[in-house]
Image (cartoon, rainbow, N blue to C red):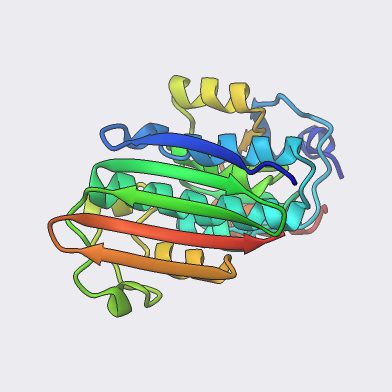
Amino acid sequence: MSEELVFRFKVDGDDFTSAGQASVQVKKNLRQLGLSAEVIKRVSVAMYEGEINMVIHAGGGDAEVRVSEDYIEIVLDDKGPGIKNIDLAMQEGYSTASDTIRSLGFGAGMGLPNMRKYTDYMDIQSEIGVGTKIVMRVNC
Amino acid sequence: MTVNELISTGYFKPVSLPSPNREIVGAYVGDLLSWVMGRAEADNAWITIMSNVNVIAVATLTDVSCVILAEGVSLDGEVLSVALEKGVNVLSCELPLYEAAIKLGGMI
């Protein structure tokens, strides 16, 4: 029986400039595990978008990456304001990000669509005023 | 063509050059980071006018061979030190985005 590997990260909500650190670390870890470049890219993109979302919208949160034999699972958990309309948020180009965020090259409304595009499974549970939990899987 | 060979043409100046022998295969032009994340390919040269620290994260994650800052955009010291630390090549040029892409496209 193979043991499941778990990487846990605290995503800092105050520091927009350090956003991406968890994703970069995950990419490094997955490389060391010898996973294919394609899988690593898909996990990295999905994770980065999720990380940025948590920084922009939720004041940070927790990220967990589980590596099992068949897939990599990314769990993003935040205590932010929640997503009002998930269907709308999943549409390319829809964004509630501020002008400041846009001036940094984000807020194009591509985050959640990219996360769906690059993963094989994605589930969003969100409650207004409570937070959002996103589970994504990329098959190995 | 390697990043170093691109620099030796004289059109693009090195800003951060930790991996000068990276091979450039194709290019991508864009400033919206999510868009670039999803579309730039590994070993591309990425031409942009964005120069904040998130550019370095995106360059690392997409594994582009270099970032080319067009239109005379420069990196501040903090971002430069992150680029060096993460092993991200960054070049700059005075050319506008379109001209920079044309120039690069003719060489790679």
Residue A130 image position (x, y, % from top left): 17, 55
Residue at (29% x, 48% y) in the render: A78
Residue at (52% x, 57% y) in the render: A46
The residue sitting at the left extreme is A129
Q: Nearer the viewer, residue A47 or B56?
A: A47
Left-right relation of A5 to B96: right
Residue B3 image position (x, y, % from top left): 78, 37
Q: Nearer the viewer, residue A35 or B92?
A: A35
Residue at (48% x, 68% y) in the render: A122
Left-right relation of A112 to A31: left
Position of the C terminus of chain A, as image quadrant, is bottom right
- On the image, which quarter does residue A91 sit in? bottom left
Residue A104 drawn above or below residue A115:
above
**Is residue A48 visible from the viewing direction of this image?**
yes
Left-right relation of B56 to A97: right
Left-right relation of A110 to B108: left
Residue at (71% x, 24% y) in the render: B18
Residue B60 drawn above or below residue A114:
above
Residue B67 image position (x, y, % from top left): 62, 42
**Is residue B68 visible from the viewing direction of this image?**
no
Residue A64 image position (x, y, % from top left): 47, 44
Q: Nearer the viewer, residue A84 or B104?
A: A84
Q: Nearer the viewer, residue A120 or B45?
A: A120
Q: How many marks?
A: 0
- On the image, which quarter does residue B102 sit in? bottom right
